[in-house]
Image (tube, rainbow, N blue to C red):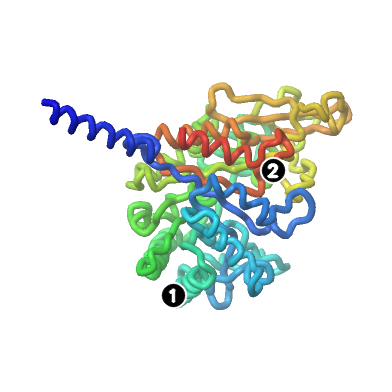
Amino acid sequence: MNCSRMIKSLVLLTLCLVGVCSGKVGQQKRHLVCFYDSSSFIKEGLGKLVIDELEPALQFCDYLIYGYAGLERSSHKAVSLNEQLDLDLGKGLYRTVTRLKRLYPSLRILLSVGGDKDIEKSEDAKDLPNKYLELLENPTGRTRFVNTVYTLVKTYGFDGIDIAWQFPKNKPKKFHSGVGSVWKGFKKVFTGDFIVDEHAVDHKEQFTSLLRDVKNAFRPDNLLLSTTVLPNVNASLFFDVPAVINYLDFVNIAAFDFYTPQRNPELADYAAPLYELSERNPEFNVDAQVKYWLRNSCPASKINVGVASYGRPWKMTDDSGETGVPPVSKVVDEAPVGGNTQLHGIYSWPETCALLPNQNNAYAKGANAPLTRVRDPAKRSGNYAYRAADKKGDNGIWISFEDPNTAADKAIYVKNNNLGGVALFDLAYDDFRGVCTGDIYPILRAIKYRLIN
């Protein structure tokens, strides 16, 4: 009897020890995928994120995805988009970043290809065909891409690649007068009259073949392969989910930027709602995007929900009203460019935070007056902040944004639905200097805390 009790006690003790070591007994490990766009390294001013400032974030990341490589149009080779930055012998960022694994041995570092960053800039570029689709159509080109991306990964010590293929985007309908007619115009944006790609069926099959070939090349070395579904790409057109998921270690769904100033210059709305909102397109939310992949046989454990660490600003006019309640019509795509990001139509979290009420702007007026912050108690839509235009029609602004709280809400959604994890776009847009509250990487930290607790 005593022997039996002793055995049971030892078993219980063993289970407790396992629980302590692994967190909780039977708990699924959820991943935090961190994106780092190297273009932030070459910025001037407060938006510049160098390696010394990147390094503290890595204690929270399971994967670091370095962006971005691209395609050489003529040869279909995978290439660096900035050779001087990435490939310089001894001090290029490719080697500098992958050496960070010495400090964080459990960190896996992937190279991302595409990511809406491989944009050709010339007078003739707008008339050129999509080189990402051209590669898919060319079997020789696909082989060359596989060989060259494998060489990049092995040469510079990456653990694999993330394929963020630049497929054609869904195009929003033309705007008409009145908010009601706008919603009518958006009703069929995912499956409506506009033909995004006349050869989408062929491109879907060819993309599956590309992922298969990459995985076959990577398998002997146990290299990782993931894909990122970029914002406003209709996954049903280009991703044969039951087929491709066999070749992928995980999928990052960039479920944000449904509304942006560039795409929707006259209508401001929530950029990344968690759930469907009334009178909106039912596809324009995180939950709908996730459920599409689940319905198509993607294991929940392979899905990472994308969270943007930035906001989307519009300028409110004297015709936009004074309440700020979205959708806000009669806005314009003329919000001031942020001093940190130096990009049109996007504010990093510290840029947004500086516009919210704080001790520095408590008594400010006009263009420096604090924005009114409106939280989302139902945790469905996300936050927004606004300043109505003055009597002269100036100084109006409206921002849909993520903050540590909304990012944490999406991490909770991931846990509640037993998904794989969260993908944060991008570390350079989080508050990596702690200027807002004194804490560095507050959005990253909030996500990590919710994923593990």
Measure how far apart labels 2 and 1 are at the Cα level.
Answer: 38 Å
> Marks 1 and 2: in contact by CB < 8 Å?
no
Q: Give the residue displayed 62% in from the left and 42% down from the top.
A: 309
Residue 165 appearing in the image = no
Q: Is 100 displayed left or right of 362 in the figure?
A: left
Residue labelled with disc 2: 348
Q: Give the residue displayed 68% in from the left and 42% down from the top.
A: 431
Q: Is 73 displayed left or right of 253 in the figure?
A: right
Residue 450: x, y in percent?
50, 34
Residue 85: x, y in percent?
67, 67
Residue labelled with disc 1: 143
Residue 433: x, y in percent?
71, 44
Query: In the figure, 163 relative to 361: above or below?
Result: below
> Which badge, 2 or 1, comes first in the chain's sequence?
1
Amino acid type at mark 1: Thr
Residue 365 appearing in the image = yes
Q: Is 196 displayed left or right of 368 in the figure?
A: left
Q: Give the residue displayed 56% in from the left and 39% down from the top.
A: 186
Q: Secondary structure at mark 1?
A: helix
Residue 23: x, y in percent?
40, 37
